[in-house]
Amino acid sequence: MIMNRAEEHNNKEIAKLGMWIFIFTEIILFGGLFIVYSITRSKYSNEFHGAAAHLNVIIGAINTVILLISSTTVAMSITAVQTKNKKLALRLLMVTIVCALVFLANKYFEWSGKFHHGLYPGSDLMMELNRGYLLFFSLYFFMTGLHALHIIVGLTILLIVYYKIDKGIINHEKYVLLENGALYWHLVDLIWIFLFPLLYLIT
Amino acid sequence: MKHDSESYLVNKGKRKGLLAWVTSTDHKRIAILYLASIGFFFLVGALIGEIMRTELFEPGQQFISAQTYNALFTVHGIIMVFLVVIPGLSAVFGNFFLPIMIGAKDVAFPRLNLFSWYLYVIGACLAFYSLFSAARPPDTGWTFYAPYSTQTGTNVISALTAATVLGFASILTGLNFIVTVHRMRAPGMSWFRMPLFPWSVYATAWIQVLATPIIGITLLMLIAERMFKIGFFDPALGGDPVLYQHLFWTYSHPAVYVMILPAMGVITEIIPTFCQKRIFGYKAIALSSLAIAFVGYFVWGHHMFTSGMSNTAQWFFSFLTFIVAVPSAIKVFNWIATMYKGSIDLKPPFLYALAFIFLFMIGGLTGLSLGAIATNVYLHDTSFVVAHFHYIIFGGMGFAFFAAIHYWYPKMFGRMYNIKIANLGWLIIFIGFNFLFFPQFVIGMMGMPRRYFDYLPQFTFGHQISTIGGYILAVGLFIMIYNLFKGRKGPIAEANPWGGKTLEWQISSPPPHENFDEVPVITGEPYNYE
């Protein structure tokens, strides 16, 4: 029995270390984009300044708040699982999932607004834009698009975690999947915390 | 209990045949899957190389067009770099022996390990699709330099996607190995009791994890640029082509160390075994692997001395390039010092290891003349670079791969190949290799550009020697592969035919499913000869 406990503990450490290293790779992946952003920004600072004014700061700010709330609730649900409060854990996790969906819905309206004005990657309007504007909007679509993809992946993980808590597979003794899912969600949140000022606020 | 010590080659469970292999999460079986797929791709890449050499036998067109030639060197590069040498040693021998050598039953994430192999296969399929569909194979070279890669009408997108997917496979393998080394070592196996092959695989894994995401995002940007005319890199659209080169080499230079570090690890295992002597400078070798991994991250600019960089950046990258040679040299000196007064046994693995040291030194020293700014400008984009690269990658990583397969073959398959034929194969490969690539140094210095389909008459002699060398090499490879293939039915090997001291030689051959009947406890250093 003691042997099993030690092994269980070791397995948990293994899973968490793997997740942390994976998170490093994600940060470096976005790091490449941030490098391109900073270089093009220094080259076209006036155009970036002008183009950023066209983004909707309010939707961006709402989405920031939503993600911060969702990160809090997913962290709280870990504590709830640890204290054997399954019902609360499920509720908190549901808040996170709903937040993720609201984020995606906002993103949808924001993007479709842009599309409506003929502003999307490869559109005729984009091709006619000044180069600096084109690069800003391209980076905007590329970075927020890749981020939205991460939101969808994170959402899927959280749904699996929700199911497993419900079935009791994740419980107060074994909750490393929940912890790793939460870590991933914090990463997605963190990347947005950087994207928001870089794209929306610096005008 | 008998069931537990059964060889991993015997199917366990209900599934049979190939299905039992492609669904197994046993690290040893996954290693064999990699071995088979990498071996196949190596032969395809080598065949393409031979076609190019045949075309270059005389100036002017022989039997393929210039456009086909462009496609061939691109395809040769993509297959050899992304499908063979980057995964190569780490995925095959790292997978097979890393867990055994640190006393673990498997890697940290066995299912992720199998998933990585599937990603690798998907990447390989995409690569082959780009090469053979619609008769428009990519013609950009394996470096995909923008803006040509954003404008050419060939299958660049699927080739880029392939490289991205393969990158993810590489990241996940690296992640798996890091966690394995951190968390799965047997009791008593402290960091400095670990054999040196695991050390080198560990250092490699960090490069894979920290550098590969950069190429992932860069290639994604290139795909987006091609599809939507975004203009990150195309100067006609306001982008910066030098930026692409920076991002590309930020990964692709460290990738060279992904190829060569495990090769150095293999050599470090073979030399003490065949000299029956403790490795000289254990800690220096272990830490120099980490030093190479670290410094290797900051030298990418030496690929771009003629691309337009500030003078400060040029001397900085040149200086660091010289620095990164130091840990490599430390290893070479330690290998030589290990041989001193050892009782040397000239078996095939050791012969390959000797050839590795010889060829790697030629490759390394010519690398210094490419790393120095003045000579680089003169030699840039000549066949001197091609020769240097092949001395490091084929002469280094390739020979280390052959050394590893000859060294661990009796352990992996429990049988022994014919030693005499293996020696013959080694000799012919070694001669053929030098005839193939050494003339390219000479004609490169005379001014022969790389990647050219045609050349001036004064280079003919060098090209002809090179092509003949290519054929000799092919004969040698055939002998080696035939011998290894036939070895499956060879005499049954003992558990420790070479008298090795590391853990993999202490278990039966081929290893049982779970590697160890009981968890080994380590009480001393790995190379306790004497």
Image (cartoon, coloured by chain):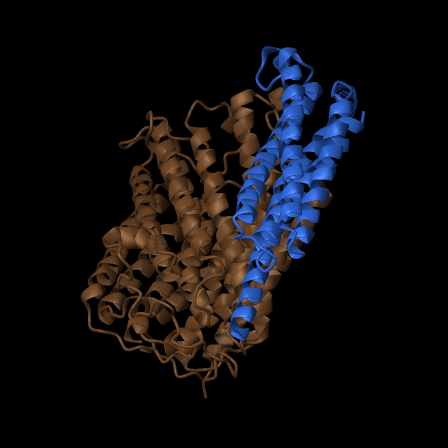
Chain colours: A blue, B brown
Location of the C terminus of chain B by quadrant is: bottom left
> Which quadrant of the view contains residue B241?
top right
In the image, residue B519 lies at what x, y percent? 45, 76
In the image, residue B279 lies at what x, y percent? 50, 78
Location of the N terminus of chain B by quadrant is: bottom left
Residue closer to the observer: B4 or A176: A176
User: Residue at (51%, 40%) from the top-left corner?
Assistant: B381
User: Residue at (60%, 58%) from the top-left corner?
Assistant: A17
Q: How many marks?
A: 0
Q: Is residue B128 left or right of residue A16?
A: left
Check the image and name the residue furthest to the bottom. B530
Query: Can residue B314 be seen by looking at this rendering?
Result: no
Query: Can residue B506 be seen by looking at this rendering?
Result: yes
Residue closer to the observer: A34 or B184: B184
Q: Is residue B389 above or below residue A14?
A: above
Residue closer to the observer: A152 or B91: A152
User: Residue at (69%, 48%) from the top-left corner?
Assistant: A75
In the image, residue B205 lies at what x, y percent? 53, 57
> Which quadrant of the view contains residue A151?
top right
Q: Is residue B109 above or below residue A70?
A: below
Q: Is residue A131 left or right of residue B216?
A: right
In the image, residue B61 lies at what x, y percent? 31, 30
Residue closer to the observer: B452 or A148: A148
